[in-house]
Amino acid sequence: MDAEPGEFLTLLTPEEIDALRAAGRPRRWERGTTVMTEGDTSDWVLLLTEGRVKVSSHTTSGTEVVLAVRGPGALIGEMSAVDGSPRSATVTALEPIAGIVVRDFPAFLATHGRVAVLLMQLITGKLRDSDRKRIEYGAFDTTGRVATRLLELADRYGEQTNSGVRVALPLSQDELAGWTGASREAVSKALRTLRDRGLIETGRRRVVIHDLEGLRKRAR
């Protein structure tokens, strides 16, 4: 079972992974399926094993705000499962996905103390990342924020090619806008600016980064 670096699964021992598998059941979802819904209450979590999901929330005006894109090895829905509060976000499959559904996750943690500590560290990391993104929204312009998100996708999903780092973009421009806290028009303009500078090349659901260092400088 492959997992992205830094995701929950990579922190577990083979024995803990086996125990988690034994406590759950495998399940698959098609692209576009809502896996979890904001406001629902439940005690199950999803250990993602294949594919990527979008974690999002909606403002009172109905605007979608993308909070994260998660891939194989990620643990999804852990906060609601632990504290019993309603789901704080909606999780949607960006492509066909598979995972292990573990119900009564608190009971699993009660018998696996080391995993509970790892989970605390994971949640703390997510809170730090959320704080960092809030700072970005205040300090960076739209082009800087788009550059930062593209670098994040490249680090996690990028494939080195002769022409640069290719990223199979799982997000539409509307979703990318929701991830950068900007309008679709502003994101389209930012992508055009990055293209005009020769930093990236865009296509349908893909981006090729020609100049990683240049993109990092623009992100800063």
Image (cartoon, rainbow, N blue to C red):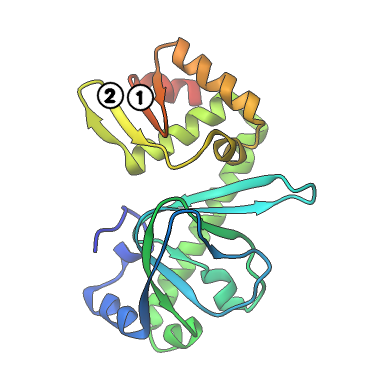
Quarter occupied by residue 180? top right
- Residue sticking out furthest to the left: 162
Q: Position of residue 163 (x, y in %)?
A: 25, 20
| 80 lies left or right of 100 | right
Callout 2: helix, strand or loop?
A: strand
The earlier-in-sequence mark between 2 and 1 is 2
The answer to whether mark 2 and mark 1 are in CB contact below 8 A is: yes
Q: Position of residue 110 (x, y in %)?
A: 45, 87
Quarter occupied by residue 118? bottom left
Of the pair 144 and 42, the residue shown nearer to us: 42
Q: Position of residue 43 (x, y in %)?
A: 55, 80
Callout 1: helix, strand or loop?
A: strand
* Residue bearing mark 1: 209
Residue 147 is marked as none
| Residue at figure coordinates x 52%, y 68% from the top left | 77
| Residue at figure coordinates x 52%, y 15% from the top left | 193
| Residue at figure coordinates x 51%, y 63% from the top left | 123
Instruction: Please identify the quadrant where the N terminus is shown.
Output: bottom left
